[in-house]
């Protein structure tokens, strides 16, 4: 179950984390692995709840085939590590190392002791997909007989399906981001720079309960045709669109919502032209149709195909230049990806964005994005802000 942290923020409880660790160990043994070596990042948070700093000093969760998992940390981080729930519950042991120690030899020793086969050489380990190359090379030197593989081979199918506690956190993050979009849409925009509005978005996300604001795309005018536009000193004017794509994390789980605004300054003459309205109507239809198709056993690529076929049939296929969606959870982008060539069948609990876009370079663009969970009988849409074009005073 979720629980409140000392700061009052929700988080995944120690019992759920202990279950994940037990499950991960079972899957590792099934795969013939002697240990899982988990570095700083989402996998470490998933298994232990520990949001460690990405230092040049090694932090590593060692989940051996036999015995208690150990969290190897620099001694200066030991106090923080001992405060996490799985350590307090004695599910995980903290093993500090000093500045003059060899942390890789320490990890190798823990793996060898946990292999459970009379001191035989360690045969196989899995390491975090995004572990720094310098750490991987040092670990290979400390475990010369071991075959190294990626941790995603063990954890992908576990992390790809969100349990009810995770869905609750995703929903809370989505609703908080919804409130930010509504606040921005009903505030002053004309005469402000994109970067100023972006700064306000970030402040509002934190005020609404986010741990952090990860991104705040404010793409106005012709820059609305650039999907990952970096907010600039461009001044927002009446009579133009803004693609607002924002997100962060709440309780460790992500929000990600995009809405398209058109600012008029209160003058109907500054409203969207007929071409933009026609383009947006196609986009609205594509996003709605793709969302309706979400249900168990539907291939991920099918959701992409549904949106793409509608946009292509209207003559905008060349202007839809990215996949329809990406998974979300502890990371902003994770499995499953809604893209051609991905036959992964949707399963209840999978969470992902549905975000088709149309981008006419040199003119303007638009995108609509929701976070959707695959339910037992269809889509569960977490975002609630209207998907109609937000024509605002600005």
Image (cartoon, rainbow, N blue to C red):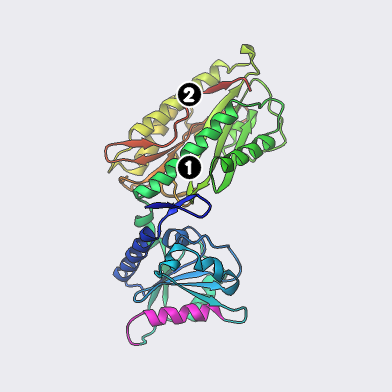
Q: Quadrant of the C terminus?
A: top right
The circle drawn on residue 265 is none
Residue 279 in the image: state x and y as whole percent.
Answer: 50, 23
| Prevalent SS, magenta region | helix
* Residue 237 visible to an observer of this rendering: yes
Q: Is residue 208 magenta?
A: no
Q: Is residue 108 magenta?
A: yes
Residue 255 in the image: state x and y as whole percent.
Answer: 49, 42
378 relative position to 355: left or right: left
Residue with the mark numbered 1: 173
Residue lying farthest to the bottom in this orientation: 118
Q: Does residue 106 lie above or below 209 as drawn? A: below
Residue with the mark numbered 2: 388
**Residue range of the region highlighted in magenta in the rendering:** 102-118
Q: CA distance from mark 2 to mark 1?
A: 21 Å
In the image, 138 versus 158, the foreground residue is 158
Q: Earlier in the sequence, mark 2 or mark 1?
A: 1
Q: How many marks on residues? A: 2
Residue 86 in the image: state x and y as whole percent.
Answer: 42, 65
> Circle 2: is it few (<14), some (14-19), or many (20+) Cα within 10 Å?
few
């Amino acid at each position: 179950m979720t629980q409140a942290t000392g700061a009052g923020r929700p988080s995944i409880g120690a019992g759920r984390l202990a279950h994940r660790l037990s499950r991960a160990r079972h899957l590792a043994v099934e795969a013939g692995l002697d240990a899982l070596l988990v570095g700083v990042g989402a996998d470490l948070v998933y298994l232990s709840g520990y949001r460690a700093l990405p230092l040049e000093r090694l932090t590593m969760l060692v989940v051996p085939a036999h015995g208690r998992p150990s969290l190897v940390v620099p001694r200066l981080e030991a106090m923080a590590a001992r405060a996490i729930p799985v350590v307090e519950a004695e599910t995980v042991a903290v093993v500090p190392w000093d500045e003059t120690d060899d942390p890789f030899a320490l990890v190798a020793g823990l793996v060898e002791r946990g292999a459970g086969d009379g001191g035989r050489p360690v045969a196989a380990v899995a390491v975090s997909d995004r572990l720094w190359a310098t750490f991987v090379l040092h670990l290979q030197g400390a475990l010369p007989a071991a075959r190294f593989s990626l941790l995603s081979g063990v954890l992908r199918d576990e992390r790809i399906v969100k349990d009810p506690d995770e869905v609750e956190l995703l929903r809370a993050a989505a609703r908080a981001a919804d409130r930010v979009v509504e606040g921005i849409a009903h505030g002053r925009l004309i005469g402000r720079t994109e970067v100023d509005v972006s700064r306000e978005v970030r402040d509002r996300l934190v005020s609404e309960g986010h741990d952090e604001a990860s991104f705040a795309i404010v793409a106005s005018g012709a820059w609305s045709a650039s999907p990952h536009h970096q907010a600039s000193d461009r001044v927002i004017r009446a009579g133009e669109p803004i693609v607002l794509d924002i997100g962060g994390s709440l309780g460790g789980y992500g929000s990600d919502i995009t809405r398209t605004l058109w600012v008029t300054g209160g003058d109907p003459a500054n409203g969207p032209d007929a071409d933009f309205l026609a383009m947006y109507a196609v986009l609205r239809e594509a996003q709605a149709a793709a969302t309706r198709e979400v249900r168990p056993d539907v291939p991920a690529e099918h959701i992409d195909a549904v949106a793409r076929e509608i946009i292509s049939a209207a003559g905008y296929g060349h202007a839809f230049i990215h996949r329809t969606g990406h998974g979300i959870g502890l990371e902003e982008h994770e499995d499953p990806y809604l893209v051609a060539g991905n036959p992964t069948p949707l399963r209840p609990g999978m969470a992902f964005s549905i975000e088709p876009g149309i981008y006419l370079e040199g003119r303007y663009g638009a995108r609509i994005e929701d976070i959707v969970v695959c339910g037992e009988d269809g889509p569960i849409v977490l975002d609630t802000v209207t998907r109609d074009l937000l024509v605002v005073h600005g």
